[in-house]
Amino acid sequence: EAKANKERKKKKESEEKDQKAIEAFNAWITKGKCIDTKGHPVLNKDDSLSIIKVWLPKIAPTEKVGDFKTMKKCNEWLGNLAGGSTWEEEIKAIKTKFTESILARSV
């Protein structure tokens, strides 16, 4: 029982992080997908951090959220994501997975 509760709590926290990242991404789209002259997304620090918190464990597990103290560093990191896809494609994949998880629970 305690282990099941811990797993549920962990899943809920993960879903909350995913939701914040999705909301940040949607706001960026709504505002016109602004990018700077170097091709980095223009997001406020809170929005870029919410996305970074979702990706760091998956993409760069050796880096720490605490290393991202400025909006500039956050946005540069997002704009420089590599690995065969752009940061937009990555967040769309998270959005799809999140939606599928919510729909599966409602059945």
Image: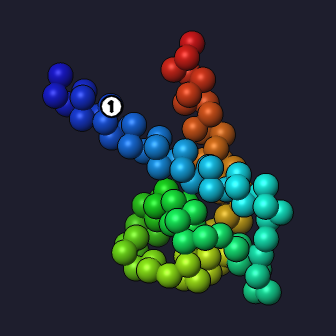
Residue sitting farthest toward the left: 2
Residue sitting farthest toward the top: 107
Near-viewer residue (12 or 59)? 12
**Residue bearing mark 1:** 8
Residue 56 position in % (x across, y down): 46, 65
Position of residue 107 in the picture relative to residue 42 (left or right): left
Near-viewer residue (15 or 89)? 15
Where is the N terminus found, in terms of image quarters?
top left
Seen at 38% across and 37% down, the residue is: 11
In the rendered view, tell whether residue 18 sits above or below residue 61: above
In the rendered view, tell whether residue 102 sits above or below residue 75: above
Give the residue type that dot 1 points to. Arg
Seen at 66% across and 40% down, the residue is: 96
Tag 1, which secondary structure?
A: helix
Which quadrant holds residue 31? bottom right
Which quadrant holds residue 77? bottom right
Residue 46 visible within the image = yes
Residue 32 position in % (x across, y down): 83, 63
Look at the image and name its color scheme: rainbow
Near-viewer residue (76 or 97)? 76
Could you tell me how many numbered marks the image carries?
1
In the rendered view, tell whether residue 36 sits above or below residue 106: below
Where is the C terminus found, in terms of image quarters?
top right
Residue 81 visible within the image = no
Seen at 62% across and 34% down, the residue is: 99
Residue 50 position in % (x across, y down): 51, 60
In the rendered view, tell whether residue 81 sits above or below residue 57: below
Residue sitting farthest toward the bottom: 37
